[in-house]
Image: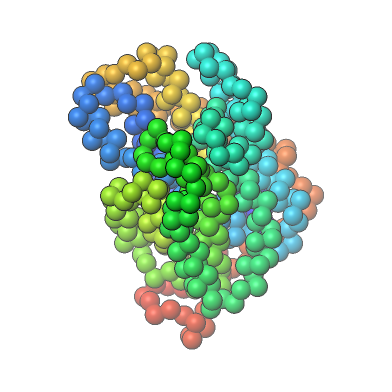
Amino acid sequence: MTTDPRRPSGLSRLPSLTGLRFVAVLFVFAFHAALEAPFSDTGFGQAYADTVMNAGWLGVSFFFVLSGFVLTWSARPRDTVPDFWRRRAAKVYPLHIVTWAAALVLVAAAGAPAQLRQALPNLFLVHTWFPDRDVFSSLNDVSWSLSCEVFFYLLFPFLLRALRRIEAGRLWVWATVTALLVPVLPLLAKLLPDSPPLPFGSGSEWQFWFVYVIPVGRLLEFCFGMFLARMLLTGRTVPVPVLPAAALVLVAYAVSLQLPFLYGLTSVTVVPIGLLIAAVAQKDIRGTASVLARPMAVRLGEWSFAFYLVHRLLLQHGHRLLGEGRTWSTPTVFGLFAAAFALSLLISWALHVCVERPAMRLLGSGRGRSAPPPAPARPSAAARPATTEATPSRTV
């Protein structure tokens, strides 16, 4: 169900999507940098925070949709469920364990050692099932999204079987319904307790957990990505070019900043994110040149998982080492951001080379070798959408 175990990533046949991963992780970095409130110019600091306040939510939503898309795209019919699970575990857990251990040391050094009720669920990536912010945001708090991914991976083989039974002409219906269910979550969250209140945004911890954290809710975005990939594999096209799709993402992001907090998390951005992923994938299918497919962009995309896991720890504990609560002039702050970014990138490269790739080779390989993913089918004249986009090439 994934790529050949010898390959480091299921994105190897869609290089532009690999490069796009790093763009998404930059949004997350900008958001987490704002949480440190390092600006002595409070007016500028507030303007920066207001601008990037939903950037982290956008980046993580992108990862979830992309995950469903890529796993479906790269799935092999002859793959086995245990082999798939083993490769996903080899991808996720070694890096997570390294950063989990680093977080244990750092929070202890900060004078707030992790409790067992935090450390143990976090280690096994089940902490998002607890509606307690002290648990689901514990230690290296970005690891909450890995807990969701683990849930997706457990279900994926069975979801894929169901997906393959859906008629190609009905995939758009399923994708649309799935995307429309995402804004329903904030409505349902109103039925949950309105306390304790969140220290950010609005709403309660219970409501935030239900809308944004619990894996069951985020499964909608993952499935949306699966439907999009299946459409391309069956010869359908998404009639939105890359630049309009990117513009639509930015417009949706601007709209999200104006919405009530819980509605601004994922409700209006999930469809534009999916359209952008599909549009970029179609460029790769056609073999169209893309700056995102250049070797350096692809390399950065391959490091993005490690970057995601280390950047938050560096921002938090780097600020603490320089002086907890300390602020600086605006030029100095951006210099510190650049230094944190560069150091995160250096560490992510080292972790990718020394942990991620060796783990995939040693733990992710198996005896069986699967055939490459099938080429997208050419749509029939009746099924082909009215668009000037080229149909996917059968040689990919």
Query: Does 358 sit above or below residue 38?
Result: below
Query: Front-most of 73 and 268?
Result: 268
- How far from the left and from the top, in percent, is residue 34? 34, 31
At 69% from the left and 46% from the top, the residue drawn is 87
Horizontally, is 141 left or right of 355 in the view? left
Q: Is residue 66 visible?
A: no
Q: Can residue 317 be seen in this view?
A: yes
Which of the image's four quarters has the N terminus? bottom right
How many numbered marks does the figure carry?
A: 0
At 33% from the left and 40% from the top, the residue drawn is 53
Query: Does 17 sit above or below residue 105?
Result: below
Query: Front-most of 77 and 181?
Result: 181
- How far from the left and from the top, in percent, is residue 28? 41, 39
| Residue 158, quarter of the rendered image | bottom right
At 72% from the left and 38% from the top, the residue drawn is 362
- How far from the left and from the top, in percent, is residue 259? 31, 51
- How far from the left and from the top, in percent, is residue 171? 53, 72
| Residue 277, quarter of the rendered image | bottom left
Query: Front-most of 177 and 154?
Result: 177
Which of the image's four quarters has the C terminus? bottom right
Horizontally, is 312 left or right of 243 in the view? right
Horizontally, is 293 left or right of 364 in the view? left
